[in-house]
Amino acid sequence: MGMARWKFNKTVWVAAGGTAGHLLPALGVAEALVKTGVVREEVGFIGSTRPIELDIVTPYGYELMQLQVRGLVRKLSLSNLFALWLLIIATIELLILARKSPPRVLIGFGGYFSFPPIVTAKILRIPVVVVETNAVAGLANRLAAKIATKVLVSFESSGIKNAEIIGVLLRPEISSWAGRDSDSSSFRAERAISKGSFLVCAFGGSLGSYSINEAIADLAEWWQSRGDLDVVIYHVIGSRDFPQFKDRASRLVASDSAVKYICAEFDSKLYRALASSDLIVSRAGSGTVAELGYFGKASILVPLPNAPGDHQTKNARMLEDQGAARVIFDHELSKERLAGEIEALMADRRGLEEMSKRAAEGFKGDGAARVGELVQAFFGNEERK
């Protein structure tokens, strides 16, 4: 642990990281805490060493401690021994740090990197609040829930007993966004998308999804060769796959077909596209599920295969059961399958509107403020040591 880490003197530890889908809801909670009076500089994030975590967290003014840890694989291997060793070392480092400057509370959002701070907090009798945002809890949160002071879940289906349901968690920009209608209109205007054009927004998470990117590019080429649809594809490729798809995307953008294709490597204000779109094609992470409900958008969801606990399939099935989404599994994904689903919805606008209505009905409000209130209860009137 570098010397800078010994200065990680925070009142609130937030263990969250890995992907934007995990970090953005955690940031929503952090912002809610700040609104209750917690000083921004007193909130610190603990995550992994993925570069995207710094890119997402630091612009909000929070410090991020990145632990040198890795996850366990579900089979016997030498790599698991090394991963376990790293987790032990990280826990020892955090114990030393927390004894010197203990936080008042730890908020954990799951993931293997949450184990060291949660174990540290338990040993030192620091309150632990576990937050689960998926339709079913992952292994880390199921284990953490057994020693947590408080467990908060977005959905009753999480499978954690004695948990309080707080609703979904939104990224900070959305929860404070007042211009949903006007900004969505300007999104179309800025990209010369007519009000009557059917807008499909496709993305695969912060890093992107190769299978979704391949299927969307194939679909765009097919539709452009036909040229018989008034449809626009807004495709956020993701930083991981963008170099591979860049040339192909440029050709699609330059096409003079009636089918318009617009692409971006990353869109930090993707919520504007969601608000403007008629249909969403995406993975089924908890952040996406929350935003689909907030904006009331019909979707075609392609769950990430082999996600921990298969939580994305359960998230997608939950929306499908609500009548808000269609589900296509990764191995079934193709331009033909996508075209069939999308064109059927384009032809059945009443059915599409009903799906959107069901998505909105499933949204029970942003739970970040409730988490902030509950965490504040651990502060009391005691002065910080």
Image (tube, grey):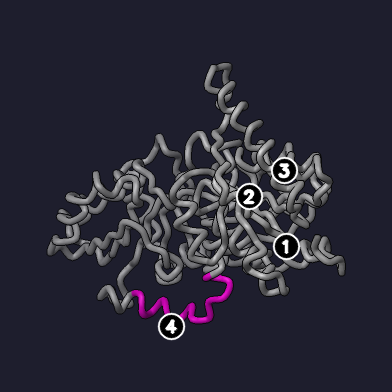
Q: Earlier in the sequence, mark 4 or mark 3?
A: 3
Residue behind mark 1: 371
**Nearest the eye: 144 or 98:** 98
Residue behind mark 3: 118
* Residue 385 as seen in the image, left or right of residue 280: right
Residue behind mark 2: 6
Front position among marks 4 and 2:
2
3D distance between C-alphas at marks 1 and 4:
30 Å
- The answer to whether marks 3 and 2 mark residues whose Cβ atoms lie closer than 8 Å is no
Question: What residue do we see at 29% from left, 77% from top?
Answer: 190
Question: Which amino acid, mark 4?
Answer: Ser
**Nearest the eye: 349 or 165:** 165
Question: Dot 2 surroundings within 10 Å: few (below 14), some, or many (20 or more)?
Answer: some
Question: Which amino acid, mark 1?
Answer: Val
Residue 182 is labelled as 4
Q: Earlier in the sequence, mark 3 or mark 1?
A: 3
